[in-house]
Image: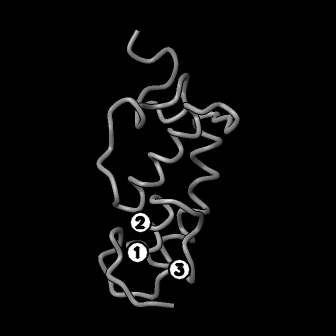
């Protein structure tokens, strides 16, 4: 595995053995994310899917997961819309009924 300076942890570390999938995005991840941070993302994506109730058969949900992944890996800046808290209690700062 090639050594690289990871875009997320900023450490010199082994990269992925191959791009996670074809295309420009897979190549960008391969060239910039270390194996350790990629494994962390694989665990985090389950949390993102569950917290935001994402259905990957919906293209907008898949795009939202992709954006979270790229932000997590330090390859994109967060956008307000994609990073907004999930509805009703998932990621919200207040519990339902607070502040009333």
Give the distance between the C-alpha atoms of the residues marked 1 and 3, in whole angstroms.
8 Å
Eyeballing the image, is 56 above or below 3? above
Q: Residue at x 38, y 29 (%)?
A: 81
Say which residue label 1 marks.
31
Question: Which one is in front, 67 or 10?
Answer: 67
Which mark is drawn over residue 16?
3
Q: From this viewpoint, which residue is outermost toward the top?
A: 100
Which mark is drawn over residue 28?
2
- Residue 40 lies, in percent from the top left, at 54, 68
Badge 1: few (under 14), some or many (20 or more) residues near its Cα, within 10 Å?
some
Give the distance between the C-alpha atoms of the residues marked 3 and 2, in whole angstroms.
11 Å
Q: Residue at x 53, y 62 (%)?
A: 41
Q: Earlier in the sequence, mark 3 or mark 2?
A: 3
Colour treatment of the image: one colour
Question: Which one is in front, 42 or 60?
Answer: 60
- Residue 70 lies, in percent from the top left, at 42, 54
Q: Are marks 2 and 1 in contact (CB under 8 Å)?
A: yes
């Amino acid at each position: 595995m090639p050594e690289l300076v990871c875009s997320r942890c900023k450490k010199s570390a082994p990269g992925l053995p191959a791009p996670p999938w074809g295309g420009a995005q897979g190549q960008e991840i391969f060239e910039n994310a270390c194996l350790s941070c990629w494994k962390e993302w694989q665990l985090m994506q389950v949390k993102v899917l569950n917290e935001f109730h994402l259905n990957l058969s919906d293209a907008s949900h898949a795009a939202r997961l992709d954006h979270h992944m790229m932000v997590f890996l330090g390859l994109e800046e967060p956008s307000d819309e994609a990073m907004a808290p999930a509805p009703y209690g998932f990621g919200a700062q207040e519990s339902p009924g607070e502040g009333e």
